Image: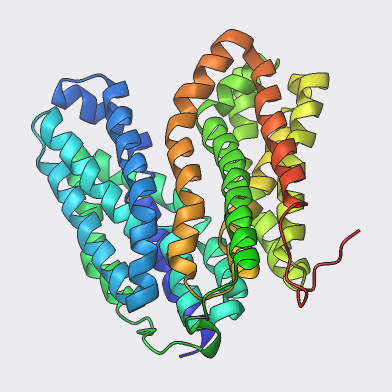
Amino acid sequence: MSKAFVIAILGTTQTLAWAGSYYIPAILAGRMADELGVNASTIFVAFSCALLLTAFLGPRVGRAIDQHGGRAVLMAANLVLATGLGVLAMAQGPVLMFLGFAVLGIGMAMGLYDAGFAALARIYGRDARGAITGITLIAGFASTVGWPVTAWMQAEFGWRGACAGWALVMLLLALPLNALLPRGTVRAPEAQPAPPPDAETARRTRRAAWLMAFIFVSGGFSASALAAHLPGLLVAAGATPAAAIAAGALMGPAQVAARVFEFTLLRRAHPLLSARIALTTHPLGAVLLLIFGGPLAAPFVLLHGAGNGIQTIVRGTLPLAIFGAAGYGARQGLVVAPARFMGALAPALFGFVVEGYGAHALWLTIALSVMAFIALFFLHVAPESKEVRR
């Protein structure tokens, strides 16, 4: 099976998984809250609990992919996502609603990017970098596809019908497509278990894992916080509400354009270079916004979106480059778990900072990006790496 075919399949199923899980609360929360007799904030609390669950389950999912390959896990994810959506469609009160989101959280842990990255590493080893970028290019349009489709299904069939509709998509489209993926049961030579490392190597590996976890936490906090507060933050910086919405619409195109840039011009460079670029664009745009105010809203969104788009790729490619393909799924699950945890809390935490300091809350995300950028220089790069130190 060609790599292009695998990328097309997994990119499509990733798009459907994101659209039918992560992106549905933004459209359905209001109607769900009205009918279930709860506040809209309660829906988002349930969704945050689902995201926290993905942080705890990530390492287990990674180990399962290391042992059995990604095909079986991704197919199971479609079944779990369909079950969670089905429970939501039948919910008559907050109990079943929370249960539905919990099941959806299990499915997201099994079926979104990190699981897809681990599946590709299991199939292609260190050669998975291009494939990882490829699926993020396709799935970068998940909100572009998901929000209009969800809104249409809600308008035609109600929010319950929208949940049921996405459940059918998981069962009738995503599941058969994932079934076409390679089984990934034959380990590549580089993915064979390595001899036990010596004490110094083990120490360096632990240090690199902690540094990488901090880097991902910093980027994940900024991405999640601004995803929730971007329009209000732009208004606080001096943009009109209409200008803030128009600027915010540039987020998706900026992410996809940056991924194309990474795929074409940076594909032969070490992922550390991509990481450095990703962690530079947000603070640069934020400083410009804080200095010049509302007129720089669109450039800020373009710079922030570009960095966020590349960071998604780096989250999959940097652990692969630093640690190798052996045990990639479990290790990547561990280093990404803190970022998932913080990403679930970031909207609420950053909201308090915005409430107190307005647009100057961006100094927090600037500081986190700068510290993460510095941490990159302490990551150990193997001697055979193509990374050029300056």
**Horizontal placement of 386 versus 78: left or right?**
right
Relative image position of residue 307 (x, y in whole percent): 68, 47
Relative image position of residue 114 (x, y in whole percent): 45, 59
Relative image position of residue 174 (x, y in whole percent): 30, 67
**Horizontal placement of 23 versus 368: left or right?**
left
| In this view, 41 is above or below 282 | above
| In this view, 371 is above or below 213 | above
User: In this figure, what is the number of numbered marks?
Assistant: 0
Regarding residue 220, the answer to whether it shows in the image is yes
Identify which residue is drawn at 73% across, 34% down.
300
The picture quadrant where one finds residue 280 is top right
Q: Nearer the viewer, residue 96 or 271?
A: 271
Report the quarter where the N terminus lies: bottom left
The picture quadrant where one finds residue 295 is top right
Relative image position of residue 316 (x, y in whole percent): 56, 62
Report the quarter where the C terminus lies: bottom right
Q: Spot the residue most to the front.
A: 199
Identify which residue is drawn at 79% across, 35% down.
284
| In this view, 124 is above or below 82 | below
| In this view, 148 is above or below 368 | below
**Horizontal placement of 231 versus 363: left or right?**
left
Q: Nearer the viewer, residue 273 or 375?
A: 375
